[in-house]
Amino acid sequence: MPDFSIELAAEQFRRAYLLYVIEICHNKDRYYYIGQTGDKNYITARPAFRRLSGHLEDRGESTQNQVYRYIATKVLGYREAENREAFHEKIKQAVEDFLVGSTIRMHIYKVHLFDPTISRSDHLINVRKISLLERHVIRAFTNSGKSLINKTTIEPTGPCPYPRLLTRIKSEFGL
């Protein structure tokens, strides 16, 4: 028997427009990151598992490792980790130790499946709608006083395009 194993459901590899909430539980503390899939620059919507691995990447030059960088800078106090330079081994070890003492959950909400034959204009419509949903969810978490990892908290510019999903998320997180 192995020491531990990772099992991923096949659905974790399907491209889709998703909203997700990463929850980090460390002792009694809870930290949340709200994100979505659907790229503004490319016609794609990455699978949830790929987004999670990007958020936890330990390369300092990365632009997608918001969760890792937040832990290094805001939780552990390594201000030098704010720069887009390689993380020192001391920072990597401290974040590793923090993560080893934590539980990470990624709560995933399917909004639309991704169609690889979609036109760029239809893709951008989907991206705008899911981005607006993301803003509504971020505002709900902020208003409830939850510890939010997201650096950018842009106010929603219109009604939520998925009100039932927003209500569901608020209910599930007690917002």
Image (cartoon, grey):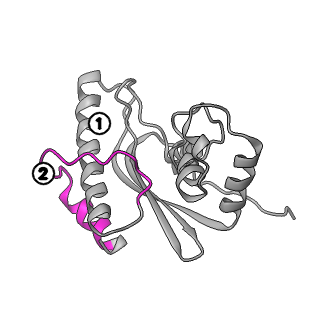
Q: Return the x and y of residue 118 as percentages of the image width and height.
A: 31, 27
Q: Relative to 159, does residue 3 appear above or below in the rendering?
A: below
Q: Residue 24 has which mark?
A: none
Going from N to C along the chain, the mark reached first, 2 or 1, is 1
Task: Give the crowd class for mark 1: few <14, some 14-19, many >=20 residues within 10 Å.
Answer: many
Q: How many marks?
A: 2
**Disc 1 secondary structure class:** helix
Residue neighbourhood size for the residue with mark 2, other residues' Cα within 10 Å, grouped as few (<14), some (14–19), many (≥20): few
Where on the picture, by quarter, is residue 168? bottom left
* Residue that numbered label 2 is attached to: 159
Residue type beneath disc 1: Val
Q: Which mark is residue 127?
A: 1
Q: CA distance from mark 2 to mark 1?
A: 15 Å
- Give the residue at x 26% y 57%: 139
Q: What's drawn in magenta, residue-wise? A: 148-171
User: Does 60 sit left or right of 134 as displayed?
Assistant: right
Q: What is the quadrant of the C terminus in the image? A: bottom left
Query: In what quadrant of the picture does the N terminus appear?
Result: bottom right
Q: Is residue 171 above or below residue 139?
A: below
Residue furthest out toward the left: 158
Q: Is residue 20 magenta?
A: no
Residue 57 quadrant: top right
